[in-house]
Image (cartoon, helix red, strand yellow):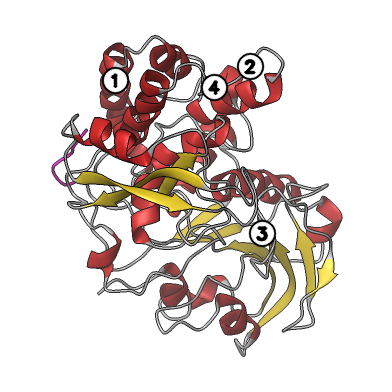
Amino acid sequence: MVALGIDQLLDPYRHLIDHKRIGLISNYPMTDSHLVPVIDRLQGHPDTTLVRLFGPEHGVLNAAREGEHVPFAEDLHTGLPAISLYGDLKAPTPDMLEDLDALVIDLQDIGTRYYTNASTLYYAVEAADTANIPLIVLDRPNPLGGQIREGRILDSAYRSFVGMLPVPVRHGLTFGEEARLIQGLYFPDAEVEVVPMSGWKRSMLWPETGRPFVPPSPNTTNFTMTLLYPGTCLFEGTNVSVGRGTPHPFEWIGAPWADGHTLADWFNQQHLPGVVARPVYFTPARSLYTGDLVSGVQVHVTDPGAMQALKTGVMMLLAFVTLYPEKFTIATPEDTEKRRFFDLLAGGTALKEAILARDIAPYFEQAQQEVRQFHQDVQPYLIYPPEEASE
């Protein structure tokens, strides 16, 4: 069974926080192996003073909607200051850190470049470096494992809060390994201490860790959602619903003008490994097509180890552009913001161009080459030994 970074911090690595005043970037879904919130564990630590909390997207309480700016507040549970890093600030300011001996960060990444916790990690490294205090990173499993990588590397011209790091879409790194990558590429003088997990192997998907899956954000509902997210999140840059406002965000995909039976038939005829689509009808309670009856598909994962997450989502995009060329849009000429958002998610324009041309093979051929090079380049930052690598 895997011991998490927080478990390790409170036993073999407790010297990192003993007799220190610390700030914590985290939220209540982050728990130890017994499902006790990390915030509680550190506030209750007898030899450490937890001074203030910092919250990523969705806030310390993990209750805000996606994209919603979270105000500064007093934490309802601990009474500590809860400072938002998803609003006017993306990083703690120097005056917020000047009375601290260390900054601790414990957040769950879900293995996909779009997930904004990795961007908060980047700004945490930068802030700790500027304040000249150590950053202690508590590691957690990558739910998608540490072997399979998919997609092209981020084009630096499309760097944003939904894509900060030069990694593939599905990157195969743990949160701690991302911290080492950030330090190595951008802040070589920063003092970054990663508290590793015990018992985690790169071949492990989340169920193999032996730990319950605690949703780290409001729409990260279950393990299946994390498997699909590298592909289905791309629909955020289109006029198709990704199921926000339903029980199955990023699993249900559809639009009022689509036919789920036709979509499912077309998709299943592509014979992608490890996934099957079925028709589904839903009415989003919010977000795109609020209150409208939507017809679409639910993508079911039948073999998590075989499924190709990014290709699954791209093939579903190809289904829409093929079956509904007059209605499906990645963007319209007037909708420059959404067009830009798709490209920010994709990390460049190549994927959009491939989908609109209905020829995705060259994109994935180039992605394979970039993944092979990334596999070599990332070796110095790995914490857990490579097993047999996959692409």
Residue 326 locus on image (x, y percent): 50, 16
User: Residue 273's x, y, as percent?
Assistant: 16, 39
Q: CA separation, marks 4 and 2?
A: 7 Å
Q: Examine the structure image and report whether residue 388 is included in the region drawn in magenta.
A: yes
Q: What kind of residue is marked 1? A: Phe
Stretch in magenta? 387-391
Q: Is residue 200 something that shows in the picture?
A: yes
> How far across and how far down the image is residue 126, in percent?
67, 43
Mark 3 and mark 4 in contact (Cβ < 8 Å)?
A: no
* Residue bearing the label numbered 2: 332
Residue on which disc 3 sits: 58
Residue 79: x %, y % from top left: 79, 82
Q: Is residue 287 left or right of residue 195?
A: right
Q: Is residue 218 magenta?
A: no
Three-letter code for the amino acid on which mark 3 is drawn: His
Most foreground residue, 145 or 243: 243
- Per the model, the C-alpha gap separating discs 1 and 2 is 25 Å
Which residue is the site of mark 1? 364
Q: In this figure, which residue is indicated by the disc labeled 4? A: 329
Q: Earlier in the sequence, mark 3 or mark 2?
A: 3
Residue 22, compared with residue 166, is above or below; it is: below
> Can residue 112 be seen in this snapshot?
no
Looking at the image, residue 2 lies above or below residue 320: below
Q: Are marks 4 and 2 in contact (CB under 8 Å)?
A: yes
In the foreground, 196 or 306: 306
Q: Earlier in the sequence, mark 1 or mark 4?
A: 4
Vertically, is 258 above or below 111?
above
